[in-house]
Amino acid sequence: MKVLVIGAGNMGSAFVKQISAAGHEVSVAARDATKVAALAAQYPGVKAVLPASAADGKDVVVLATGYADAVSALQSVGNLQGKVVVDITNPLTADYMGLTLGHSTSASEEIAKAVPGALLVKAFNTLFAQVLAQGATLADGNKATVFYAGDSDAAKQTVKALAESLGFATTDAGGLKNARYLEPLAGLNIYLGYGAGRGTGIAPTWIGA
Ligand SMILES: NC(=O)c1ccc[n+]([C@@H]2O[C@H](COP(=O)([O-])OP(=O)(O)OC[C@H]3O[C@@H](n4cnc5c(N)ncnc54)[C@H](OP(=O)(O)O)[C@@H]3O)[C@@H](O)[C@H]2O)c1
């Protein structure tokens, strides 16, 4: 797949590492061109690109910015009509211990409203950057799960295939509305990792038939 990663921070860097290692063609864009160039230089074949028109010709756009920057970042990369966009954002409060919205909407639904035509899929938001950077198999030998939720079945299949190519287990979490559940699930993961002191090598999964 041809993948554009928007963001060169904790998650953007981990995506660039893992998606390029899986053999996909990766481009990366962010605000700070120096940071983007330094990130791209670490992995053979990864291209540092300017945001303008960066989405053109890509199969998937991974949005790896904070929620507050999500819409402007997506609007900066060109035409997203019919484009698969992976939304990993969690609308966190400043202390990371709460969500700024939920119950009756979600970050994904708000982003989808602001960028109509993009095929948004909520995914990867329940994985710590450390888990993504280190790879799908956790210290206890279990595979971490990528939950994915969206309203386009074709887009969800693309995101499932991308996640599986990175070695993750996957769970179809239904329509985009269910981002209302996935974002609080990430909040619980953050509480367990930081609040309860279990560290950032953990990830939620679902067991049973
Ligand atoms: N960190 C985690 O463990 C984790 C886990 C799951 C989900 N998430 C979610 O993933 C997202 C990213 O988290 P992070 O920890 O990677 O954040 P981060 O380290 O702060 O990185 C954010 C990146 O977004 C870029 N950015 C901001 N506005 C932009 C714009 N308009 N156009 C292009 N790029 C823009 C920033 O660029 P500059 O560097 O140029 O400013 C930066 O590279 C957040 O929504 C977070 O909730 C994080």
Image: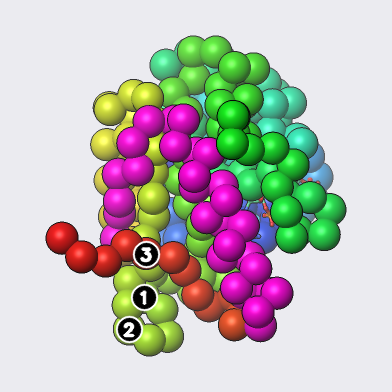
Q: In the rendered view of the protein, which quadrant contains the N terminus? A: top left
The stretch in magenta equals: 169-197
Residue that mark 3 sits on: 205
Residue 195 place in picture, x, y as percent: 70, 74
Which residue is rendered at x = 56% and y = 26% of the image? 109
Amino acid on which disc 1 is placed: Thr
Q: Earlier in the sequence, mark 3 or mark 2?
A: 2
Instruction: Give the residue at the far bottom of this rendering.
Output: 140
Q: Is residue 20 left or right of residue 96?
A: left
Q: Nearer the viewer, mark 3 or mark 2?
A: 3
Q: In this rendering, is residue 50 above or below 43?
A: above
Is mark 1 in CB contact (under 8 Å) with mark 2? yes
Residue that mark 2 sits on: 141
Q: Count numbered badges in the picture.
A: 3
Residue 95 place in picture, x, y as percent: 82, 59
Q: Main secondary structure of the magenta part?
A: helix
Q: Quadrant of residue 39?
A: bottom right
Amino acid on which disc 2 is placed: Gly
Which residue is rendered at x = 32% and y = 62% of the image? 206
> Which disc is residue 137 wearing?
1
Q: In this rendering, is residue 1 above or below 129?
A: above
Which residue is rendered at x = 70% and y = 47% of the image? 99
Residue 6 place in picture, x, y as percent: 62, 40
Q: Nearer the viewer, mark 3 or mark 1?
A: 3
